[in-house]
Amino acid sequence: MTNLVGKTVLVTGASSGLGEQLALAVASQGANVVLAARRRERLTQVADQCRLLSKGQAVAITCDVGHVADVDHVFTTIDELFGQLDVVINAAGFGDMTTVITMDAPVMAKMLRVNTLGTMYVSQLAAQRMVKQHAGEIVNIASMAGKIATPKSAVYAASKAAIIAYDNALRLELKDAHVNVLTVNPGPIKTDFFKIADPTGHYLDRVDQLALNPVKFAELIVSKLGHQRRELNRPWVMSAANLGYQLAPKLGDWLTGTVFNFK
């Protein structure tokens, strides 16, 4: 895996799920970790685990990435404590498996504010610092849903598709400054994400064979740091399905709306 000894890594959404495992994975490689999430108690516990793994610093900062002032506070703290920022991993986000016609407007607004605008703002502040350093890497956790939309995921898919497009442009803007942008597009992951997205638990049961192990997936993501990787798409079967979708979109619509509609 990547050697991150002495590097400063910010992980958003670090109190649980993939974000938690990413924080632990970078800590195991010796990084100083800044953990940002809304749940203070849980975040502090993860920070304690990170210190044991890294023998370095782990700072827990309560933050809702949907609030500009919270994000500003995170970066001010990083500037004061470390004076540099080497890697940012944006893992904060949530979903809601509700049809478009029944989803509440405040939920739609919050999802876009957190999944999309929050990720963009964190990326912007990180990019400003990394350009001055002439080095760094921004990792944004998007989703295969941003490439293959399915029923009951319209707003979530839109929030992640926007990140994929944003990253494609940001990557080009930062190339000359030697700052890489890695877009990670996972399918379903066995985490608490679905306790909010699908409280029934039926969806995760139905996609159990496709669902990713969060520990192994976090380790895979961290192993790609520093290798100028453009995208990481998993599982392979969904990545292949995306290619087929581009070649035969009408067939893809039929398959995602019927055979592969697990919601």
Image (cartoon, grey):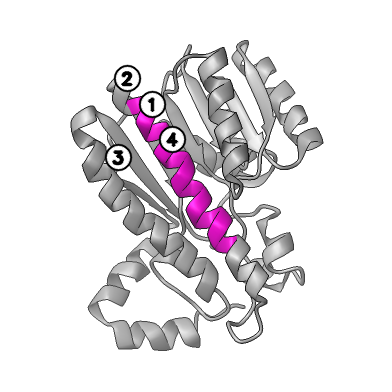
Q: Amino acid at mark 3?
A: Arg
Horizontal side of residue 232 vs 92, given as left or right? left
Q: CA distance from mark 1 to mark 2?
A: 6 Å
Residue that numbered label 3 is attached to: 229
Q: Amino acid at mark 2?
A: Gln
Residues at marks 1 and 3 touching, judged by CB atoms closer than 8 Å: no
Nearest to N terminus: mark 4 or mark 2: 4
Residues at marks 4 and 1 touching, judged by CB atoms closer than 8 Å: yes
Residue at (38, 66) in percent of width and height: 147
Q: Residue furthest left?
A: 176
- Tell me the quarter of the picture where residue 65 sits: top right
- Closer to the eye: label 4 or 2: 4
Image coords of residue 228 (percent x, y): 27, 35
Callout 2: helix, strand or loop? helix
Callout 3: helix, strand or loop? loop
Residue that numbered label 1 is attached to: 129
State the extent of the magenta-drawn residues as a range.
111-130
